[in-house]
Image (cartoon, helix red, strand yellow):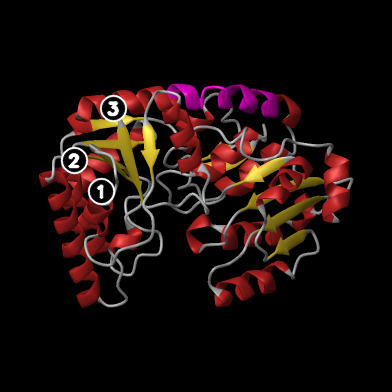
Amino acid sequence: MQVLMMPDYRIDNPYQTLLSNALQQEGVTVKFPVGYRRVLPIYRAIKNLPESTKILHLHWIDPYIKGNNIFVKFIYCIKFLVDITLTQLSGVKVVWTVHNLVSHSSKFPRLELWTQRMLANRVNRVIVHHTSAVYEVTQQYKFSSSKVEVIPIGHYRDIYEGAICSIEARQKLGLPESSKIYLNLGILKPYKGIERLVQTWKDNQTILSNNTLLIAGKALDDRYGRTLVEQASEAESIILQNIFVEDDQIHLYFSAADVVVLPFERILTTSSLVLAMSYGKPVIAPRLGNIPETVGAADRLLYDPNEKHGLLHAIKESTQIDLEALGQLTNKMCDRLNWGAIGQKTAQLYQIAL
């Protein structure tokens, strides 16, 4: 069986690399498009493959529905749906993994939602990463749950360097060696709740002064980045590094950290959580999206997103419990996110689609 995966986001996210490797073990040949074609990029990518491809596995659709004004966006959305229709008319089955209900930075969410509803009703199978997403996705996109399959995101243990001694990692990063370090790592975006995290930390210095909040990642919006830097500079116990963290540095940050904080404002699926679990780190996060199901029994530091002081209470709780024991439980929960099982389940879904 040969599958074409689109778009190719392997440079930015190891998820597709790990999934394609797992599928190769199941005898599935995974191809990615070469270059980008402005007109009918999906249909033409299928036709330009030398071998017969009967499955298109679609992931993020952002690059196919571009547009900075509503008219251009609408034209791209129509072109995208025509592209999918032609692909299916050529005999190719379409499997779509839903990573977000709409793009986090969408300027025209209603148009994007309409496009995704049209897509959901056209594709042959839909993949979501957690059970609660089945209801949310089918309600939003208005299609039958009978063609939805739950397949989780696998762990990242084999893609980045392993953990090292905490003291050594802190020395290499120039971080305090004695205090607890609370880590938020990743691209800095508003929906991730970083401003709220910084403000909560600043407002509770008497409680948290002996701990360090480390925020590391590049803000894609310069103005937003400057706002965060200015806000964080008002508290001595906050270190904000507005930098792109290279892959070979990721293990240092997780090795240095005691706890990972992911205070999302909204989320359907997050790979940041799985990355933290891959290093066996206790996670403070809201009970949103795939977070409760993915964390499983290691949910001691999850909080109600509707509770005004939920984040603060979770941070306080983390100062009073055995973090090492919770980390061990987190590691055990991460064992469930095995890429072998994920590859097998995905390959079976392809067969069903065919």
Label of residue 349 in the image: 3
Q: Are marks 1 and 3 in contact (CB under 8 Å)?
A: no
Q: Quadrant of the N terminus?
A: top left
Sequence-wise first label, 1 or 3: 1
Name which residue type carries label 3: Leu
Q: Is residue 349 magenta?
A: no
Which residue: 18% across, 51% down? 84
Taking the image as shown, residue 193 lies to the left or right of residue 125, namely right
Question: Hey, which quadrant is residue 129 in on the image?
Answer: top left
Residue 312, position as x, y percentages in the image:
63, 48
Vertical placement of 325 versus 213: above or below? Answer: above
Q: 307 and 348: which one is in front?
A: 348
The magenta region covers 326-341
For discs 2 and 3, the disc positioned in front in the rendered view: 2
Vertical placement of 100 versus 351: above or below? Answer: below
Q: Residue furthest left?
A: 89
Taking the image as shown, residue 64 lies to the left or right of residue 35, namely left
In terms of secondary structure, where does tag 2 sit?
A: loop
Question: Hey, which quadrant is residue 120 in on the image?
Answer: top left
Q: Residues within 10 Å of mark 3 (few under 14, many from 20)?
A: some
Vertical placement of 14 versus 109: above or below? Answer: above
Q: Are marks 1 and 2 in contact (CB under 8 Å)?
A: yes
Q: 86 and 215: which one is in front?
A: 86
Residue 346, position as x, y percentages in the image:
35, 28
For discs 1 and 2, the disc positioned in front in the rendered view: 1
In terms of secondary structure, where does tag 3 sit?
A: helix
Question: Would you name the residue on which mark 2 appears?
Answer: 92
Taking the image as shown, residue 300 lies to the left or right of residue 173, namely left
In terms of secondary structure, where does tag 1 sit?
A: helix
Q: Residues within 10 Å of mark 2 (few under 14, many from 20)?
A: many
Question: Would you name the residue on which mark 1 appears?
Answer: 46
The chief SS type of the magenta part is: helix
